[in-house]
Image: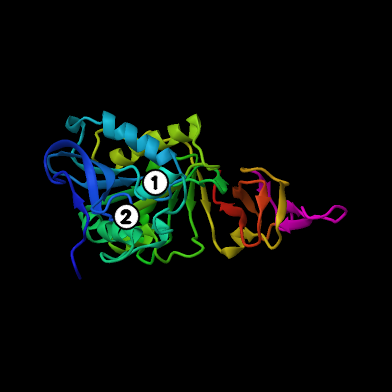
Amino acid sequence: MRPSPVRPTIDLDAQGKAHGFLRLPWSHDESAWGNLMIPITVINNGKGPTAILTGGNHGDEYEGPIALLKLARGLDPKQVQGRVIIVPFMNYPAFRAGRRTSPIDGGNMNRSFPGRPDGTVTEKIADYFERVLLPEADYVLDFHAGGRTLDFLPFAVAHMLEDKDHEARCVAAMKAFAAPYSLMLLEIDNTGLYDTAAEAQGKIFISTELGGGGTATAASIGIAERGLDNFLKHAGILDGQPQHKPTIMLDMPDHDCFIFAEDEGVLEMANDLGDKVNKGDVIAYVHNAQKTGGEPSPYRARRSGLLVGRHHPGLISTGDCLAVLARVLDD
């Protein structure tokens, strides 16, 4: 396979702290020999594990970029034992546009792995992570939130894996992050995910969902910052023990946890995030916005659990994810 066209402007192995870019040639109407410049910071001190920390995998999710920008600015190399690679805006074009996907090629970074060195801009970035950065990592943390169209309880995420020893190491890192909730997440479809790429290479990988609505709050940013510090301490890259905060353990045992809209109209939630619901309870109604006089369509829980995610905008369309439930394992 041809080499990646992405070139870092800094030495990723040099000791100390360096701020630079991942430079990807990108010829377009406004710049014939132009480049896409993706910010990166590397902090390296002595021997130890390598952690790759990413935000902006989807461009309308902000807790990760904010926490990682602050870490890149404030972390002293003397505090580090090993190496920290920080990419606050993984899909930089999407982040700059405030969109989930890239305005250049429509690429969803988290559906583009393993990528291609001769593909679209998004595929070239994915290929660089797949073949260059991920092989260097021991620990990987990828920040997510609900973006403009979803809202979530703040939770850290690990996945069920065939290798149970590998799964246990990921779960330990998830618990160390110490979000208010910790979820064994069932993906709708894990094809093309950064998560799957990292796990397939045997990396200790966790992710998050820390809110949504296309913004970040003081509380969600605080969770991200504390969790980031805990994650690096758990990895042995920073000294000290993680700040163990209470976390409610959740899992998603089957696809009945997802409720998808079969109507379009105005969404009325009958329950709020964090509410416990029983199988058969009405979670939401969708009202017909084209005429008056009709009854709204009720949407019922297909299993008992906690409402951990919901559609965010007031209007909903057929096929949209309306709600997400999870089973409470302990309180």
Q: Amino acid at mark 1?
A: Gly
Location of residue 160 with respect to 217 vertically, above or below: below
Residue for point 47% across, 48% down: 99
The residue stretch that appears in magenta: 275-300
Residue 25, quarter of the rendered image: bottom left
Q: Give how far across and how far down residue 60 sits, in percent.
A: 47, 45
Residue for point 66% across, 61% down: 318
Question: Of the numbered discs in the image, which one, if any, rests on residue 26?
Answer: none
Q: Nearer the viewer, residue 330 or 101?
A: 101
* Left or right of residue 246, residue 19 in this image: left
Q: Quadrant of the N terminus?
A: bottom left
Magenta residue check for 222: no
Q: Few, some or many C-alpha atoms within 10 Å of disc 1 (few <14, some 14-19, many ≥20)?
A: many
Q: Quadrant of the C terminus?
A: top right
Location of residue 161 with respect to 87 vertically, above or below: below
Residue 77, quarter of the rendered image: top left
Q: Nearer the viewer, residue 24 or 192?
A: 24
Location of residue 300 with respect to 148 vertically, above or below: below
Give the residue pinned by disc 1. Answer: 56
Q: Give how far across and how far down residue 239 sits, in percent.
A: 24, 33
Could you say whether the residue bearing mark 2 is in a helix, strand or loop?
loop
| Residue lying furthest bottom | 1
Residue for point 67% across, 50% down: 315
* Left or right of residue 195, residue 256 in this image: right
| Residue lying furthest right | 293
User: Of label 2 and label 1, which has the lower sequence position?
Assistant: 2
